[in-house]
Image (spheres, rainbow, N blue to C red):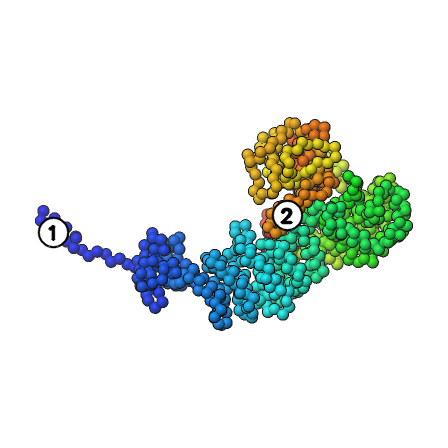
Amino acid sequence: MAQQHAEINQATLKPRPVVKPTNSVTFQTQLVRARIDPTLPVSDVVRQLCLSFGVTDPPSYWELRANENGELLTDESLFRFVRDNISLGLLPSTLSQVQALRETILSVDTPSPALKLALFQLQKRVKDPKFAETFVDQGGLKDIVSSIGQLEGNTLAYALGAIEGLLEFTCKNEQGNPVVDSQVILCHGFVQMITGVVSSRSSPINITRSATSILRYLVPINFQVVYSSTQSHPLLMDRVVERLKSEEGGEVLHSLLLINSLISISSEGTKTSEILTDLDKHEIQSIIEDLMNRPCGDEMRKALLGYRFNIAYAISKSSQSFVDTTYNLSHRLLLLHIWDSTGLTDVELKVWSKDIVRTKLISDEEELKWSVLGLDVSHSAGRNKVIWKTGKLGLDYLHWFATNDRAAFASLIHKQLRAKPSERCPIGQASNETLDHLLAQFSIHDISPGQTITSFVLQLRHIYSLALQFFLRMWEESNSMVDERGGEDDFRRVSEVVKFWIKEIFTVGAQTPMIQSSGLQRAKGKDYSWVEKMFRESEWSELRSKMRQVGEEEREVLDNIAIRDLTSSILEQCQNFVQEQRINCLLEGAWFKHGALTGPYFREPTRDVPRGWTFVRLAPNKHFLAYCETQHQFSAKPTIDELSERIDLNLVHEIATKTAYPIISETFDLDNGSSKIEISKRTVPSDLSFSLLVGKGISVLDLVALNRAQFSEWTDGIGYLLGRSPPTQTQETMELIKHLTEVGLKLRLLDITGEEVEVPDELPIPAPPSNYNFYFADPM
């Protein structure tokens, strides 16, 4: 027992192990070695260290950072810092630094060198997201904006650099949209000041570079405010385009990004045409081509690809937008400008148009003018409606064609009027037809972010001019005529030749070895001058002969019984595929403008105040449509359970088209980025309207689609569900099925003809490149 007691005493008398410190911490000139518990909050660690160093300031004024790289110690990184024995420093916290900088900026007694140094430090510190966020939350951005008018030289450059950094790193949410206080950043004086700096040729490069970047960030916040400011500085676009030729890469990049932002945001509003026209005046396309041919970094390459996509997307949106030359003043003015370019007086109009009045039912002088221009005019509700197959884009392009060289356009019109009525080419319809062929060739109607876009899209306006002149020349060379009884056989014939030649030029001609020096696709040796030569030197007889040859070769293949059977099988598969796709569109649901019925149709009113928007979705069982009517669109699509109204498809007998007009005339508010309602004054049925009828003339739902694609998807999708025969009505669906069938047939024929091809066992390995001065193509 005594021995056991002695052993216990010896055990208790052993010295305890020494606790080793985990980290060394410095504060000013002091150094301590501390053992930090990794389970504690960082705020507790800071508080205990402040006590150890005898700091009297509140612990919130201090923070811990790694001495080696300045990384901030957080609750998430505390365990790693302790495990790796990282040396720490007790430094002023972000909040205290922000307050000190704000005091320096706001103090009227701050000498100029001290203010310059503070802004220089701020320009660097805003790259830290936490610092930038704290700076904005404490009102620092407002401080800089309010005092920036008194700054100049490098001090101004540092201030603009700090604002640029704040917008870039801290003022974006998950969607990438700025969330800074718009009243602060969009105050009139600040926007005008930034626009003035960008417009000035005398501004130093370090100032204009940051100002251009800031203006780019302001565009998505409120396009209308920025656009109005740019209009008060007419030289702004001159300077921005001019800087694209600069040798300083940053200046070029920021200028291009500003242009991209203006085009991208304006494509959702009404200013796209003005911006693109302004850019075209500065011959920006040739500058972009030069930039594409230079070696460039990733940022510049993506900006160039972004520019090409933005141009294509803006063209696509414009081609699908509705044209109303009756009630829309801007549209009507464009049409009147086209007429003014003819140079015809009222007396000349009456003399030259006697044959037109005699051969056509002309209701008034206005319709007579549009007939002279060769436009397609329809009558509805006592109004003359000019039909634009290619939307607002077609109106803009014909306006540009007429006003760009008024003398040539006037000469063209006079030449047409001197010919016999049956020999006159309808210029307006030829313009629409030509532009539609080009849009189809470049796949502009269904543009998507991942789509490869040819560089010829950047010169579409000039290519359109060449193609339209080619159309008119083909009409003359072929001695084409318009049937006075309304037939258009010759017009269709010439249109098919133009379509064929466009396809030959831009499919065969552009499919050549590509230069990948900057990751941008450009056809080797196939530029605008080559395209111009193809349009100007081709003759009618040669093209018709080539068309016949191609047609005979295709018929020889298609006349084969096996090929006909294969085509029939593929056609059925394509029809089923399109049917499934159309019905899937109904299941996903979509927003429509609410329609007001016209003509012989009737619907009982459901409310005193009409709503502007209707969301419709097909139920999963495909037996009924659910919908709701609202005054505004919502970003999130309502679920089937959130839709209060129901329509049993078993009760629907027919889909009637061109039945209603939209009760709203505006669909997008650029000031706040949301939809708004304005009661429309037009009573002419829209080409995109349709109604579901349950009896003779009795409608249960009246909708106006937002574009031709949506109209086609929904009318044909509902038609499939109703078992309509034939199942397709719209031209878009029939062309899609035809295109898919042709592609499917070609692929199957390639499979068949490739069965006997010998595949080599080993492929030759090419020699390595002589240098590495190249880039791989970006999949986007």
367 lies left or right of 122? right
Q: Which structural element holds mark 1?
A: helix
Place of residue 188 in the rendered image (x, y in percent of width and height, measured from the top left): 60, 60
Residue 742, position as x, y percentages in the image? 70, 40
| Residue corresponding to mark 1 | 6
- Mark with earlier residue (1, 2): 1
Up/down of 191 relative to 110, above or below: above
Q: Where is residue 240 in the image (x, y as percent from the top left)?
A: 64, 63
For the image shown, how many numbered marks are present on the structure?
2
For image coordinates 54% across by 70% down, the residue present is: 154
* Position of 198 relative to 472 (above/below): below
Residue positioned 53% across, 53% down in the render? 179
Q: In this view, does 476 lie to the left or right of 185?
A: right
Q: Which residue lies furthest to the front in this view?
A: 608
- Residue 239 visible in this rendered orientation of the protein: yes
Mark whose residue sits in front, 1 or 2: 2
Q: Where is residue 745 in the image (x, y as percent from the top left)?
A: 69, 39
Residue 213 appears in the rendering: no
Tell me the crowding category of disc 2: few under 14, some 14 to 19, or many 20 or more residues within 10 angstroms, Cα based.
some
The residue lying at 75 percent from left, 47 percent from top is 325
Residue furthest toward the left? 2
Q: Is mark 2 on a helix, strand or loop?
A: loop
Q: What residue type is labelled 1?
A: Ala
Residue for badge 2: 668
What whole-number distance in Å separates the C-alpha atoms at marks 1 and 2?
A: 92 Å
Query: Is 596 situated left or right of 151 in this image?
Result: right
Residue toward you, 714 or 641: 641
Q: Which of 615 and 611 is in front in this view?
A: 611
Q: Is residue 40 left or right of residue 698?
A: left
Q: Nearer the viewer, residue 619 or 68?
A: 619
